[in-house]
Image (cartoon, rainbow, N blue to C red):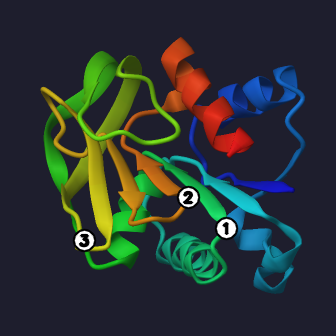
């Protein structure tokens, strides 16, 4: 069962609508109400974007990431979800030079199981990953962002700086992630 962690992104409804349209079985929780001992009931996780930075939400998302890594479970971090993935493992984020909002072409330079060769995706973020730790691999970049897709080395754990729930190519990525 897939758990969608709703961190408050304005785009979470689009993600839920897409999962329902594709008949992908999932549950949705907000971090503040999530009982961490229930994580064992899930085999995969999607961490949504967010609107504001909250320490407690960061801690809960980091625990989900750690649980996923320790148990070899699938995880997709979207925007903030990718940023907290990098931060949890020792990476850094920075304020973007400009607010990234709109469609962007990204270039895939390392083969993975969830993306197409080149993708047009929807960006909406004011922060971005600035450094990834050794355990994470960069799979894609754009003209505006060095780390568009990241993956935990040899595990089905991914992060996208963009919002895949907002574009056709992104929908394909979500579907491929769910079918891994």
Tell us which disc is closer to us: 3 or 1. 1
- Element marked by disc 2: loop
Which mark is first along the chain, 1 or 3?
Answer: 1
Asked if the residue under mark 2 is in contact with the one under mark 1, i.e. CB atoms within 8 Å, the reply is yes
* Residue where numbered disc 2 is placed: 156
Position in image of residue 34 (x %, y %): 78, 72
Residue nearest the viewer, comparing 19 with 69 = 69
Distance CA(mark 3)–CA(mark 1): 21 Å
In the picture shown, does residue 92 fall above or below 78? below
- Element marked by disc 3: loop
Q: Is residue 125 left or right of residue 75?
A: left
- Residue drawn at point x = 31 percent, y = 73 percent: 135
Distance CA(mark 1)–CA(mark 2): 7 Å
- Residue drawn at point x = 55 percent, y = 31 percent: 173
- Residue drawn at point x = 87 percent, y = 56 percent: 1
Which mark is first along the chain, 2 or 1?
Answer: 1
For label 1, count other residues whose C-alpha is less than 10 Å away and answer few (under 14), some (14-19) or many (20+). Answer: some
Residue nearest the viewer, comparing 7 with 145 = 145
What mark, if any, has residue 73 been given in the picture? Answer: 1
In the picture shown, does residue 87 fall above or below 53? below
Position in image of residue 132 (x %, y %): 22, 64
In the picture shown, does residue 63 fall above or below 105? below
The image quadrant that residue 31 belongs to is: bottom right
Position in image of residue 105 (x %, y %): 27, 17
The image quadrant that residue 166 belongs to is: top right
Tell us which disc is closer to us: 2 or 3. 2
Q: Is residue 100 left or right of residue 162?
A: left
Position in image of residue 54 (x %, y %): 48, 68
Residue nearest the viewer, comparing 72 with 132 = 72
* Residue where numbered disc 3 is placed: 91
Distance CA(mark 2)–CA(mark 3): 19 Å
For label 3, count other residues whose C-alpha is less than 10 Å away and answer few (under 14), some (14-19) or many (20+). Answer: some
């Amino acid at each position: 069962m897939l758990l969608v962690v709703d961190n408050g992104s304005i785009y979470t409804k689009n993600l839920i609508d897409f999962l329902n349209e594709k008949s992908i079985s999932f549950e949705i929780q907000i971090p503040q109400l999530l009982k961490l001992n229930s994580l064992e009931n899930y085999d995969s996780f999607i961490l949504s974007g967010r609107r504001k930075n909250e320490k407690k939400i960061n801690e809960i998302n980091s625990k989900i990431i750690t649980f996923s890594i320790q148990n070899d479970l699938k995880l997709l971090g979207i925007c903030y979800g990718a940023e907290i993935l990098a931060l949890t493992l020792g990476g850094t984020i920075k304020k973007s030079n400009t607010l990234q909002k709109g469609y962007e072409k990204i270039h895939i330079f390392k083969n993975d199981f969830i993306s197409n060769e080149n993708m047009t995706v929807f960006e909406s973020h004011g922060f971005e990953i600035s450094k990834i730790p050794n355990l994470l691999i960069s799979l894609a970049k754009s003209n505006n962002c060095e780390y568009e897709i990241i993956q935990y080395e040899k595990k089905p754990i991914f992060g996208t700086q963009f919002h895949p729930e907002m574009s056709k190519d992104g929908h394909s990525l979500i579907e491929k992630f769910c079918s891994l």
